Amino acid sequence: MAVIAGADRIVENPTLLEHKRWGIVTNYTGVTSSLELTATALHKAGAPLVAIFGPEHGTRGTAQAGFSEESEADPETGLPVYDTYLKEGAELDAIIAAADVDVLVFDMQDLGVRFYTYVWTFVDCMRSAARLGIDVVVLDRPNPLGGVKVEGPALDESGFSSFVGRVDVATRHGLTVGELLDMVARRDTAAGLPEANLRVIEMIGWDRKMLWADTGLPWVMPSPNMPTPDSALAYVGTGLFEGTLMSEGRGTTRPFELIGAPWVDRRYVETLNALELPGVRFRESWFNPTFHKFAGEVVAGVQLHILDTNSFAPVATAVAMIDAAKELYPDHFAWRLPERSAESLSDTIPFIDLLWGSDSLRTTIDAGGRGGNLPLVTTHPRDAQLLY
């Protein structure tokens, strides 16, 4: 039996909510078990839906990383669509207030990785809703990476909070969206911020030990560069390569599984396989990205082949890959520096620091140390209320 997500429960019975004017924060990953868009299904079911709010990549998923679609009318329902990407504070308050809703419903497929932005769109919208006195309802969905394993460093909120990590959770945090938002809401209340009136429509049949293949649900790419569940599992670690000048495989059919640069040679694959990292084997690969880093150039590198999802440790694997690249190619390996004008503090920080959650990985490696010696968080946050 397939897991029944919160979206299916609310479409089946919209009267679970008593509100009169609904806004939904969603995109093309917000679908029912029959693969109909949740917004369309709710509209057909007679729910009083009056507005749609879109995240990074847009409601239809046509925009690449770092971009969104312009606000326009939804072609299925005719409802107005508001772009929330990179909006926060008073600007986001004004967008939500203009829609005149009395509840914000959240429904997107998150990835379970701290630097994946969908959940922070939800957090920003929840905080706006709290300031505006609007209720929030989360239609919960499975964490594709399961809810047992937690891996990755802590986030230093004092200097490295950004849209790729608002609060201190591990890289692979092991929480559903409902659990994470509940945790943030309670932390905000304890910190004296406006209290969010949050409700979670829980799933039926999801177990924390489940990976995506165990849910019985079809895989809808959470973003344009996340084609398979293996891509998502690799991304937990190899997403860190976005903070380097090496290619993370964007512009190929296997992003985050292909890693390389024009200056990589066979020593890379030999070094990585000699480490005998658990659950993974590396194959020497060449690729020609159609866009992003090294577009149109032949890139040499490796493809990760995940052989055992239980023993594979994506963050530790990626850090070992970064260590090896720095040691083998010290004249070529470099970090990606800020490209935008300094509109905020996070715009001045090397991207690897925002992804890692502090500057410890970069400064350790630059000083000649090994990132693999850094500590990793391995437990759920103490104040996370696990719902399943």
Image (tube, rainbow, N blue to C red):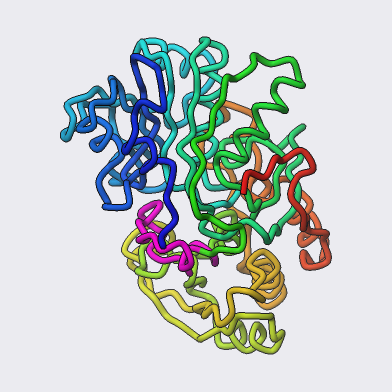
Residue appearing at x 56%, y 16% in the figure:
130
Tell me, yes or no, if residue 301 can be seen here: no
In the picture, measured across the screen, residue 42 lies left or right of residue 278, that is: left
105 in relation to 287, above or below: above
Tell me, yes or no, if residue 139 can be seen here: yes
6 in relation to 334, above or below: above
Could you say which quadrant of the image residue 276 lies in? bottom right
Which is more toward the observer, 11 or 270? Answer: 11
Which is more toward the observer, 125 or 206? Answer: 206
Q: Which residues are magenta?
A: 212-234
Q: Quadrant of the N terminus?
A: bottom left
Q: Where residue 115 sits: x, y (%)?
A: 58, 47
Residue appearing at x 20%, y 26% in the figure:
73
Q: Where residue 110 sits: x, y (%)?
A: 49, 47
Q: Where residue 68 sits: x, y (%)?
A: 35, 37
Residue 319 within the segment the image draws in magenta: no
Residue appearing at x 72%, y 28% in the figure:
187
In the picture, measured across the screen, residue 97 lies left or right of residue 339, that is: left
Instruction: Considering the whole magenta stretch, tell me its main secondary structure.
Output: loop
Which is more toward the observer, 67 or 82? Answer: 82
Task: Report the number of numbered marks.
Answer: 0
Q: Where residue 107 sits: x, y (%)?
A: 41, 38
In the picture, measured across the screen, residue 308 lies left or right of residue 103, that is: right
Could you say which quadrant of the image residue 19 lies in? top left
Residue appearing at x 40%, y 18% in the figure:
18
212 in relation to 181, above or below: below
178 in relation to 245, above or below: above
